[in-house]
Image (spheres, rainbow, N blue to C red):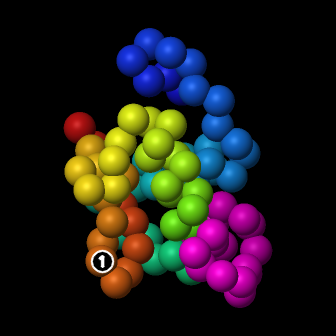
Amino acid sequence: MTHQGVPIALAPSELRLLLTLTASPGQVFSRQQLLEAVWEHSYHGDSRLVDACIRRLRQKMGESREQPRYIQTVRGFGYRFKAA
């Protein structure tokens, strides 16, 4: 993946998260759904793990939390990917 022509190194969990979101643009995923899809099991830990991973991914993509371009927060539920 690149941002403004510069290659971006993604951690395995960041890549899986991005692939999960981009596979179904517009679909809203709960934090629990993302935990299970990305970490590949019924993970019943802190769902803030997803928030932290989203935050890192947005930073690497040059997005801000206040004005996300691609990864959007659905308040009280989770996240979705908005295709350009």
Q: Nearer the viewer, residue 76 or 80?
A: 76
Nearest the viewer among 59 and 35 is 59
Determine if residue 15 is in view.
Answer: yes
Q: Position of residue 50 (x, y in %)?
A: 57, 67
Q: Position of residue 35 (x, y in %)?
A: 63, 71
Residue 82 can be seen in this image: no
- Image quarter where the C terminus lies is top left
| Residue under the point 23% across and 51% down | 67
Q: Is residue 46 left or right of residue 7?
A: right
Q: Quadrant of the N terminus?
A: top right
Query: Does residue 15 appear left or right of residue 69 in this picture?
Result: right
Query: Which residue shows up at 44% across the image and 46% down it?
Result: 58
Query: Is residue 48 part of the magenta span, yes or no?
Result: yes
Query: Residue 41 is drawn in which quadrant?
Result: bottom right
Q: Considering depth in this image, is 29 or 11 the residue closer to the camera?
A: 11
Q: Residues within 10 Å of mark 1 (few under 14, many from 20)?
A: few
Q: Compared with residue 75, is residue 39 higher up or lower down, i.e. above or below?
A: above
The span picked out in magenta is 33-49
Q: Which x, y percent locates residue 62?
A: 39, 35
Q: How many marks?
A: 1
Mark 1 highlights which residue? 75
Q: Amino acid at mark 1?
A: Arg
Nearest the eye: 4 or 24: 4
Say left or right for 10 vs 70. right
For numbered disc 1, what is the local secondary structure?
loop
**Residue at the spot 44% in from the left edge and 24% down from the top edge:** 3
Residue 12 is situated, as x and y percent measured from the top left of the image, at 72, 45
